[in-house]
Image (cartoon, grey):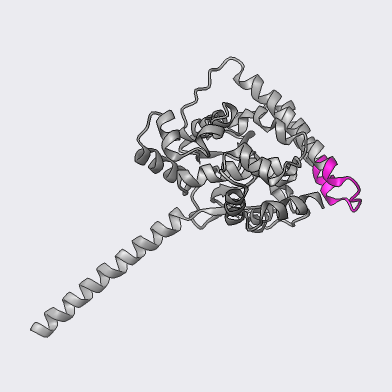
Amino acid sequence: MQITELCNRFTELQSHAILLINIFEIYLFMTKILNVENVADYERYVGHENLHPYVSVIPYESVSPIRHSRTRFNVYGLFLRDDRLEELTYGMGSYQYEEGTLIAVSPGQIGGVEDNGEKFDIKGWALLFHPDLLRGSSLESKMDRYTFFSYHINEALRMTADERSTFICCLELLEQELQSNDRLNQNTIVVSLIEVVLEYCLRFHNRQFNDRKVENNDVLVRFEQVLKDYYKSEKQFTEGIPSVKYCSEKLFLSTNYFGDLVKKATGNSANYFIQQFIINKAKSELVANKSVSETAYNLGFGTPQSLSRFFKTHTGKTPLEYSNLKSK
């Protein structure tokens, strides 16, 4: 009798263990994130041929069906979706949108729909481009104009039929250039075409939100603005590089709570967010032919050596190596 009870008990415990393992596996499956460090990462995921290291134009009909993904982007992206999703996560919130709308993402943002393992038909277009494509171009200094990339826009851009047609024509022209065998001035042409796309999107965006007040209620966009204001007011010359404590105080949040919010939204720490912001500023300074010493001073580092160590830790290259690579 005891042996029977022990066997039954063992079987019961085994069933519970299997159930817990299944629950844990489901949790891991549902919380996984697709990391898109460059355009090729996304192209591999959807099954699209890579034509350029920094730019991708994807007509979704050529790769459909694909799986949903909750994605962390290190690239800029514009996604025209001609199908309907009930709810899409974006930043720290979510929104609903209808067919024929445009979604914009920028480096550091997270968005998408949890991958449930099923494939679905997707219609529309995608344009992705890496910020390194813009280094040293006039477009780099204009990116702040395109506010539709910001987290505080918690709705997708609803385009009219004419606007949608214009957008697709621009992408088709860009796709044609990427497929061309003539590489003469190709990057200059590609950047110019991307700028045309962004200017059209800005027109569409202004049309949609012309009579609507958009509130800055997302902690990430306010975080980024604090960093921009920090350097604009030249605090780095007296305070050094910005700290998490300074940013949290500016946002009227405790440091720990602020850190938790950022971690939940991005999967990374608030300090990492600051570091990436500084790295991007350093890259822009170096591409503008600033010396390592000038760049270190302008960003708030005590010595050029401090910047060099910081830069190599986060990029794998010294500032000088990065400058030489870009100049080539």
Write down the region rendered in magenta.
Answer: 173-188
Q: Is residue 18 left or right of residue 247?
A: left
Tell me if residue 107 comes above or below residue 315 in the rendering: above
Decide which of 22, 233 is in the foreground and name it: 233
Whole-percent x, y for residue 221 in the image: 52, 32
Magenta highlight on residue 178: yes
- Residue sitting at x 58%, y 14%: 211
Q: Position of residue 116 (x, y in %)?
A: 48, 54
101 in relation to 318, above or below: above
Q: What residue is at 77 percent from the left and 38 percent from the top?
A: 137
Q: Give the quadrant of the N terminus.
A: bottom left
The residue furthest left is 1
Q: Residue at x 25, y 67 (%)?
A: 16
Residue 144 visible somewhere in the drawing: yes
Which is nearer the eye, 277 or 285? Answer: 285
* The image quarter in which residue 284 lies: top right
* Overall secondary structure of the magenta section: helix
Q: How many marks?
A: 0
Left or right: residue 183 versus residue 136 is: right
